[in-house]
Structure formats: structure tokens, C-alpha cells
């Protein structure tokens, strides 16, 4: 049996949802998290006390730093900024963030890990750069140049026990190990639902109720509820929300109340307690509505929908915390990917 853990570096780590999933396997140790998002790194540090943090633009880091990690890292995980690819954004081909995957390639070439995993929004698959080159093709080409094979697949977090329909493209990259993906554990017949996720979180209060679902038991930890301060909306917003049934949205709001200034299908969307959540973005900016009360979900409620357990604490103001969650990889999705990679690493090369 392997005594030491596989070593992981998390690039563009945010709060470390991907890292949290890898660590849940007990087979991986995340030795480094890198990002330039200050408040997210503070949240990362709060919840990953043994991980070294690097708060610096990856494009400005000397190659000598990475050379010190050569052959000491088994896996690089990375979630480069996705704003340039998002279907809900401007999809600007000139967005400089679209090329940050090249930093992952550069670091991979130096460190030579056994695996690289890149997570991003599905919109990346239909994007081109300013010269008209297909982004996914460029990513594959760049890794092929340094001797790595690459496959990609769209995974839905709900298939792995996350109470949320969240599709993301996962690039699996390696020189010598199988490029395989975790098999789905759930389907539309048994998805974890919003009700399963939130059932033991009181509408207000500081302690959890007794868990009534397997998912609630899985998430349980601290008895004290962190990050559970409901927003006090003004009377007009409450009136608008009161008109929206579960699964409904801004279209259910009478014209005389105004419709919230947005026409996206998920604006003023009330969560359906019998289904997984819609894809979580910034819950308060999109005016996501709690399934049973007329307010947006608290940070803790969104954390449950993202599969962060009750021990995970978010720092910063409420808006910061909601943005951290919107950008995060759901830990249970990270866990499923980590388990697949762990199995392959233990079985050896192709």
C-alpha cells in the first residue's frame, strides 16, 4: 500500500473546491494553490491549512520557481478564468484571459506531472481566438507539442451527487496514463435534489436540524452554521418573489411590479425542491429564490448546492462569498475525478 500521498498543484485555485474534492479521497495532498484573487485565497487558506499559497500572476513567475517542483508533482489541476468563454458573457475573442491555458502548458512542461486536469465552462468548446483558431484545438495542440495526450468530455455535476445541474468541460491530459473519466453515479431517476440538500438548514438560526437525507449526512460537520445570514430584501423585491412558483422565473411577475431588469431565463428563478438546482452563478445578482421563502439563498445554502460540506467557511463580504461559490468547482465533482485518477495512478502506466 502506498504510504505517501500523490502531490497536487492547483492553478487558478479560487477557494479550492477542486482541491477539496481531491483531498477527500485521502490519496492526494495539495501542496500549492495559486491565484491572484485575494479574498478567495483567504478562504482557501482558512480551509486548506497545510497548503502553500502563491498570490501572484502566473505570467510573471520566474521559471526557476517551477523548476524546484520538477518531478515532485503528480497532478496539476487548473480552472483558468472562464469569463471570456461563458455563454452568459460577451464571449470576447480578444479577452486576454482566453489564453491563460498557455501558462498551464508552460508549467506542465517544466514540472512534468503525471496528469493535468483543466476545468472550464462548456462555452469554451465553441470559442475561437482573435485569429479564428479553435480554442479547444489550440489547447490540444499545445499539450501535444510537449508530449502529452489530451481528451475532453462534458461532465454534469449532478451525475456525481451534486444537487445542481452544472455542466463543465473537463480536459484530461497525460503522457503515459489512461485518459479515462469517472462513470456517472446518479441519473434523472435519483438525482440529489434541492430539498435533499437544504432540508436540515433552518430558514434562520445558528444550528442545523437533524439530517433527514443521505446527502445532508454526507455534508454534516460543524453544528454551528457558518455563512447563513439571510438578506433583507425591500418590499418590492419580496412582492416580486412572492409571485414566482417553484421552477418559475421573472416571467411570472406581473408587469405592474416590474420584472427585475433582466430577461435571462434564470433571473428571479425560484428553485424547485424536487429537482437539482439550476447552474449556480452569483445567487444575489441573478436573484435566485429559495424554494420556500421569499429571499435569495444564503451563502451556506448555496454552498450546500455546490457540495461544500458544513465545515467549509467562506470569508469576505456576502457578495464576495457568493462570487467565490459561483466560480468554484463542486467538491463532489472534484472527488469523482480524483478517484478516477487515483485508480489509474495506482494501476500504473498504459
Image: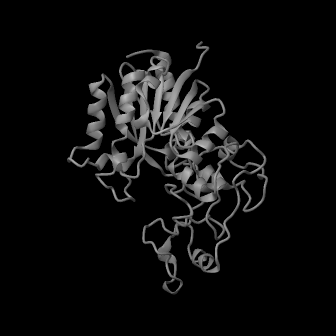
Number of callouts: 0
Q: Work out whether residue 131 can be spotted.
A: yes
Q: Nearer the viewer, residue 113 or 155?
A: 113
Q: How far from the left and from the top, in percent, is residue 131? A: 20, 47
Q: Nearer the viewer, residue 67 or 187?
A: 67
Answer with left or right where residue 258 lies relative to residue 319: left
Q: In the figure, 205 relative to 220: above or below?
A: below
Image quarter (top left, top right, bottom left or bottom right) of the N terminus? top right
Image quarter (top left, top right, bottom left or bottom right) of the C terminus? top left
Q: How far from the left and from the top, in percent, is residue 331? A: 56, 40
Q: Nearer the viewer, residue 250 or 192?
A: 250
Give the quadrant of residue 301.
bottom right
Q: What residue is shown at x 43% (from left), y 23% (from top)? A: 64
Q: In the figure, 158 relative to 150: above or below?
A: below
Q: Nearer the viewer, residue 292 or 222?
A: 222
Q: What residue is shown at x 28% (from left), y 27% (from top)? A: 144
Answer with left or right where residue 19 lies relative to residue 222: left
Q: How far from the left and from the top, in percent, is residue 140? A: 29, 33
Q: In the figure, 121 relative to 75: above or below?
A: below
Q: How is the image coloured?
A: one colour
Answer with left or right where residue 173 lies relative to residue 196: left
Q: Work out whether residue 179 can be spotted.
A: no
Q: How far from the left and from the top, in percent, is residue 296? A: 61, 65
Q: In the figure, 26 relative to 16: above or below?
A: above
Give the quadrant of residue 89.
bottom left
Amino acid at each position: 500500500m502506498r504510504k505517501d500521498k500523490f502531490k497536487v498543484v492547483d492553478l487558478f485555485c479560487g477557494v479550492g473546491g477542486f482541491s477539496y474534492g481531491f483531498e477527500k479521497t485521502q490519496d492526494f495532498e495539495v501542496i500549492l494553490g495559486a491565484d491572484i484573487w485575494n479574498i478567495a485565497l483567504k478562504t482557501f487558506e482558512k480551509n486548506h491549512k497545510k497548503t502553500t499559497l502563491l498570490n501572484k500572476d502566473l505570467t510573471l513567475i520566474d521559471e526557476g520557481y517551477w523548476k524546484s517542483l520538477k518531478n515532485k508533482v503528480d497532478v496539476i489541476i487548473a480552472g483558468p478564468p472562464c469569463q471570456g468563454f461563458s455563454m452568459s458573457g460577451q464571449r470576447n475573442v480578444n479577452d486576454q484571459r482566453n489564453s491563460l491555458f498557455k501558462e498551464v502548458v508552460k508549467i506542465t512542461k517544466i514540472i512534468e506531472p503525471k496528469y493535468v486536469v483543466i476545468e472550464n465552462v462548456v462555452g469554451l468548446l465553441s470559442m475561437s481566438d482573435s485569429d479564428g483558431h479553435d480554442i479547444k484545438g489550440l489547447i490540444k495542440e499545445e499539450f501535444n507539442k510537449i508530449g502529452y495526450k489530451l481528451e475532453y468530455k462534458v461532465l454534469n455535476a449532478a451525475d456525481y451527487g451534486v444537487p445542481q445541474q452544472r455542466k463543465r468541460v473537463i480536459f484530461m491530459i497525460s503522457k503515459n496514463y489512461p485518459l479515462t473519466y469517472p462513470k456517472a453515479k446518479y441519473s434523472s431517476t435519483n438525482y440529489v435534489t434541492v430539498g435533499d440538500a437544504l432540508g436540515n438548514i433552518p430558514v434562520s438560526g445558528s444550528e442545523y436540524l437533524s439530517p433527514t437525507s443521505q446527502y445532508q449526512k454526507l455534508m454534516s460537520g460543524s453544528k454551528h452554521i457558518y455563512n447563513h445570514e439571510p438578506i433583507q430584501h425591500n418590499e418590492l423585491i419580496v412582492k416580486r418573489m412572492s409571485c414566482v412558483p417553484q421552477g418559475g422565473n421573472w416571467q411570472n411577475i406581473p408587469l405592474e411590479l416590474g420584472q427585475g431588469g433582466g430577461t435571462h431565463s434564470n433571473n428571479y428563478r425560484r428553485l424547485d425542491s424536487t429537482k437539482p438546482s439550476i447552474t449556480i452563478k452569483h445567487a444575489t445578482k441573478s436573484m435566485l429564490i429559495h424554494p420556500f421563502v421569499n429571499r435569495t439563498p444564503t451563502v451556506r445554502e448555496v454552498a450546500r448546492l455546490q457540495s461544500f460540506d458544513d465545515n467549509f467557511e467562506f470569508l469576505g463580504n456576502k457578495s464576495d462569498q457568493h462570487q467565490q461559490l459561483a466560480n468554484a468547482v463542486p467538491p463532489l465533482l472534484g472527488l469523482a475525478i480524483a478517484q478516477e485518477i487515483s485508480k489509474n495512478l495506482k494501476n500504473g502506466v498504459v
